Image: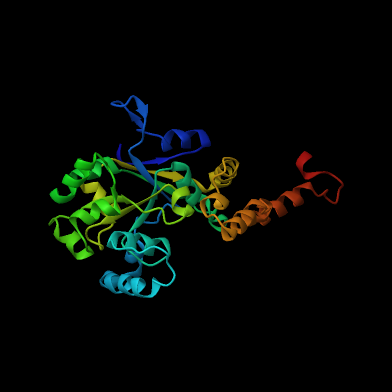
């Protein structure tokens, strides 16, 4: 399945779509080679925070100053630029990194996290990270083959390249790579997090994928399904309390969990009341 867009109409259809192409014939097990990214609006692009900033030349200045001013706040001594990049992304600095997860249900959480956007269709992107390896430069391909891995760690990247400018110089053509961030805190661990990164920070992975032999697909989540999905995720313990451990995550979860969904449809409720109200003749309009 390359570049297919699937629109689901029920929870059952959604389950089939999320786990599409997850059977590994070689292992004889359901071991997916996809990572997932959930978006609240189906029209959002796969753009990094640096892309949305619109000033990719500021990347080195942002990261340099983040490193300079953050030493007092962090407990670990990070030497690798890739660990620093992951840390900066984790704390909201605009970077070229894009957040993904191995878990389709965590991606579903981010598609339905904001109940003020339940009038909008959401989406989940899925990309086969194993397929993407074939476009890596030789230096990186050799490292990942020796490790017998499909996804990099910061330490593996450090063996071949030690700066962002060096990354772009490894190969003339743009390439994408996926790497797992260090376990900075429980949030990264619980979200089953993965990052993607383009060698050229101005290139969107959604523009890069169609021109490559990399399997990917997009699932459209209709707005009408979002509350059902949200409630079933909560029952499965996929919520802010778990994914964002701490008081902020707990408060966010409780705020949504106890929201009266009838407040989302005041006009519909008013119309229902009008239909229930007896007419002047004493007849119920529904029975007329």
Q: Is residue 285 left or right of residue 13?
A: right
- Seen from the viewer's position, the closer of residues 257 and 223 is 257
Q: Residue at x 54, y 54 (%)?
A: 245
Q: Is residue 42 left or right of residue 174?
A: right
Any part of residue 213 in sight: no
Can you say which quadrant of the picture contains the C terminus? top right
Residue 25 vertical position relative to residue 105 in the rendered view, above or below: above
Residue 179: x and y, percent? 31, 51
Can you say which quadrant of the picture contains the N terminus? top left
Colour scheme shown: rainbow
Residue 166: x and y, percent? 17, 62
Q: Is residue 41 left or right of residue 199?
A: right
- Seen from the viewer's position, the closer of residues 49 and 242 is 242
- Seen from the viewer's position, the closer of residues 17 and 279 is 17
Q: Residue at x 52, y 37 (%)?
A: 11
- Seen from the viewer's position, the closer of residues 114 and 243 is 243
Q: Residue furthest right?
A: 282
Residue 28: x and y, percent? 33, 24
Residue 73, quarter of picture: bottom left
Any part of residue 151 in sight: yes
How many discs appear? 0
Q: Residue at x 59, y 58 (%)?
A: 252
Q: Residue at x 57, y 40 (%)?
A: 236
Residue 155: x and y, percent? 27, 53
């Amino acid at each position: 399945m390359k570049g297919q867009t699937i629109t689901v109409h029920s929870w059952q259809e959604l389950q089939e779509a999320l786990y599409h192409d997850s059977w590994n014939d070689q292992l004889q097990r359901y071991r997916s080679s996809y990572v997932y990214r959930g978006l609240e609006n189906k029209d959002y692009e796969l753009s990094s925070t640096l892309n949305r900033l619109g000033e990719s030349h500021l990347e080195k200045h942002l990261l340099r100053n983040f490193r300079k001013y953050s030493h007092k706040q962090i407990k670990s001594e990070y030497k690798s630029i890739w660990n620093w990049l992951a840390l900066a992304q984790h704390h909201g600095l605009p970077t070229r990194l894009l957040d993904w997860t191995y878990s389709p249900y965590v991606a579903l959480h981010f598609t339905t996290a904001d109940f003020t956007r339940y009038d909008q269709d959401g989406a989940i992107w899925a990309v086969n990270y194993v397929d993407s390896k074939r476009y890596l430069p030789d230096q990186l391909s050799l490292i990942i083959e020796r490790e017998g891995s499909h996804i990099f760690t910061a330490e593996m990247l450090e063996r071949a390249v030690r700066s962002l400018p060096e990354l772009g110089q490894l190969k003339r053509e743009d390439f994408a790579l996926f790497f797992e961030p260090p376990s900075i805190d429980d949030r990264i661990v619980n979200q089953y997090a993965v990052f993607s990164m383009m060698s050229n920070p101005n290139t969107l992975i959604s523009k890069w994928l169609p021109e490559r032999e990399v399997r990917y697909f997009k699932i459209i989540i209709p707005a009408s399904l979002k509350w059902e999905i949200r409630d079933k995720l909560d029952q499965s313990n996929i919520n802010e309390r778990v994914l964002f451990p701490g008081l902020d995550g707990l408060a966010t979860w409780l705020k949504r969990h106890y929201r009266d969904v009838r407040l989302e449809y005041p006009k519909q409720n008013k119309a229902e009341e009008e239909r229930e109200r007896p007419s002047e003749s004493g007849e119920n309009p529904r029975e007329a």
